[in-house]
Image (spheres, helix red, strand yellow):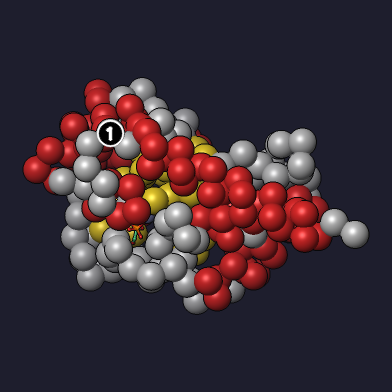
Amino acid sequence: MGADGTRPPHISASVLNADFGRLGDEVRRAADGGVDSIHLDVMDGHFVANITMGPVVVEALRPHTGLPYHSHLMISRPLGYVGAFADAGSDVIAFHLEADDDPAAVIEEIHRAGRGAGLALNPETPAERALPYLDSIDLLLVMTVNPGWGGQAFMSEVLPKLAALRAEADRRGLDLPIAVDGGVSLETIGAAHAAGGDVLVTGSALYSHPGDLRSTVGGLRDAARAGAVATTERSRP
Ligand code: DX5
Ligand code: ZN
């Protein structure tokens, strides 16, 4: 927690918009650019219309960096795949509250596999539905786009829900990282961080830049901080 009460921004690279023909290089490019984790979007063509990657891809990418791997499971039946994604090298396995399996059972299975449990909420899912699980998860993932594709517009109407979840986590004294996923860019990252999101997932805003990503990542981190500071300044009497 920073001196100004805000949590330092953690930049997470979503490789969904990277060059899939050179995914290992693209993971390293983000790591060399200074991101804090790698975000892997897993889609089954059922929970969402798109189909992206499975455990074999996570396993193939694992040797490319020592950074934490966050596997974001946009699949209908996560319970049966926890073991495979854990064995493939995921450090955090995030699944959707809207999926078909019992969330408490999936969280327990992820912990049994010795990984961090993440719970993801679609934009239309109310904050109240996540409250029973806040004490048992290691990451809350708030979607700011409807899951399925990269490059979509940021849904700012989700920010009040994000702020409410951050306030509830703080009220309970939880040191809970909250990820914001979808449409996070230089224009939107400040508001996302100010509302309480500290893990900021970014795909197209990162991989639309060729070559060295250090200044892109640095710019995103600065914009996140600026957003939070501006809000803190505004709230001061
Ligand atoms: C969307 C995915 C996001 C997406 C982020 O369903 O969960 O992680 O890839 O990409 P951008 O930043 O381009 O919205
Ligand atoms: Zn994602």
Report the residue at 18% width, 32% height from top: 25
Q: Is mark 1 within 8 Å of ligand 1?
A: no
Q: Nearer the viewer, residue 202 or 168?
A: 202
Q: Residues within 10 Å of mark 1 (few under 14, many from 20)?
A: few
Looking at the image, residue 78 sits to the left or right of residue 133; the answer is left
Counting the numbered discs, the total is: 1
Q: Amino acid at mark 1?
A: Asp
Which corner quadrant of the image does residue 60 belong to?
top left
Q: Which residue is mark 1?
A: 212
Spot occupied by residue 5 in the image (x, y as percentages of width and height): 76, 43
Spot occupied by residue 139 in the image (x, y as percentages of width and height): 54, 46
Q: Quadrant of the C terminus?
A: bottom right
User: Whereabouts is ligand 1, in terms of quadrant?
Assistant: bottom left
Q: Quadrant of the N terminus?
A: top right
In the rendered view, tell whether residue 26 sits above or below residue 227.
Answer: above
Spot occupied by residue 166 in the image (x, y as percentages of width and height): 68, 56
Report the residue at 50% width, 76% height from top: 124
Using the rendered image of the protein, determine whether residue 23 is visible from the camera's viewpoint. yes
Which corner quadrant of the image does residue 128 belong to?
bottom right
Looking at the image, residue 18 sits to the left or right of residue 95; the answer is left
Report the residue at 23% width, 70% height from top: 49
Looking at the image, residue 200 sits to the left or right of residue 230; the answer is left
Secondary element at tag 1? loop
Q: Residue furthest left?
A: 21
Report the residue at 17% width, 39% height from top: 23
Q: Residue furthest right?
A: 237
Using the rendered image of the protein, determine whether residue 104 is visible from the camera's viewpoint. no
